[in-house]
Image (tube, rainbow, N blue to C red):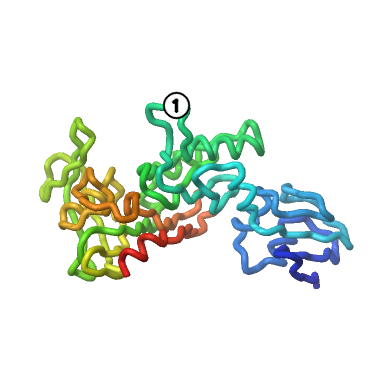
Amino acid sequence: MNQKKKREGSYLFQVTEEAELLPFLLENMKKNSRNSIKSMLTRGQVSVNGMSITKHNHKLLTGQTVEILPNKAALNESMLTGLTILFEDESIIVIDKEEGLLSMAAKDKNEKTAFSEVSSYVKKQDSRQRVFIVHRLDRDTSGVLLFAKSEKVKMQLQDHWDEVVKERVYTALVEGNVKKDKGTIKSWLKETRTYKVYSNPTDNGGQLAITHYRKIRSNRQYSLLEVNLETGRKNQIRVHMEEIGHPVVGDKKYGSTVNPIKRLGLHASALTIVHPITNEIMKFESEIPASFISKSL
């Protein structure tokens, strides 16, 4: 049996018989999923006798020491601006995006975006590696964002988005005390030439949009809502919150008159998908911003 102990936040394993690295880790780290262990390897968190190893089939010899270093978020943060990596393997990268960062370039090609930062990150590991954006978050919306590591995986995710995505959960801080504990908003959304999206209760040739919400807490001024998207249309949550008379705070475009947290009160808090290669159901989460919670107490 392999001995395991902690040393300054790391885990140490003693090799008692020859094995390949990935099977060895799977056997000794049964609480971790296969994908999370592969992600540790990719990010250089695994070392053998003090040497960082990323090859899954690296041969381990009896007597060697395998060390699992703490999550190298510090490494990622030093390389990346405005985001942290939640998960990475050979097929996908999932990040936690800060508000104020575009998903991808718009007019200014030199502006840093989530796409440019993740692209730079993977190229430092392999100059041939590319990333592909699968979906987007508004500049002022923070939270979970998914990238593909190949065009094939990107197309697979986008072409089967409704089957791949099991859950998309947002947290919204909205104006006023929402009376209903939960509700569903259904309408058709259409974008004008001025890039504003309008809602219509009947089919006007726009896109059907369905939003489910549940009240987490509220006071006289603000409500904190958990919002579950059945459809993912542009500005859907923002438009629907305005429609029920409780616009997202800081969202001047869609009816908000206050901005107590100095940002848009919208956060992509969870994304649950079927992994495009392994078919494993995976849930990625981002903590609700503290300012959202404090304003709704």
Give the class, few, some or many, for how many residues have Cα within 10 Å of label 1's Cα (few <14, many ≥20).
few
Question: In this orientation, which residue lies closer to the viewer: 62 or 13?
Answer: 13
User: Is 241 placed left or right of 40 in the picture?
Assistant: left
252 w.r.t. 64: above or below: above
Q: Which residue is mark 1?
A: 109
142 w.r.t. 121: above or below: below
Name the image quarter holding residue 215: bottom left
Quadrant for the N terminus in the image: bottom right
Q: Residue at x 32, y 50 (%)?
A: 264
| SS under mark 1 | loop
Name the image quarter holding residue 166: bottom left
**In the current view of this chain or complex, which residue is farthest to the right?**
63
242 w.r.t. 30: above or below: above
Q: Position of residue 2 (x, y in %)?
A: 80, 70
1 w.r.t. 164: above or below: below
Question: In this orientation, which residue lies closer to the viewer: 141 or 32?
Answer: 141
Q: Position of residue 86 (x, y in %)?
A: 54, 53
Q: Residue at x 46, y 55 (%)?
A: 274
Name the image quarter holding residue 184: bottom left
Whether residue 150 can be seen here: no
Q: Residue at x 64, y 31 (%)?
A: 127
User: Is 21 placed left or right of 32 in the picture?
Assistant: right
Q: Tell me which amino acid carries mark 1.
A: Lys
User: Is 189 placed left or right of 156 in the picture?
Assistant: left
Q: Position of residue 64 (x, y in %)?
A: 86, 59
Whether residue 33 can be seen here: yes
Quadrant for the C terminus in the image: bottom left
Q: Position of residue 292 (x, y in %)?
A: 35, 61
Q: Residue at x 38, y 27 (%)?
A: 107
Q: How many numbered badges does the structure rendering display?
A: 1
User: Is 211 placed left or right of 150 in the picture?
Assistant: left
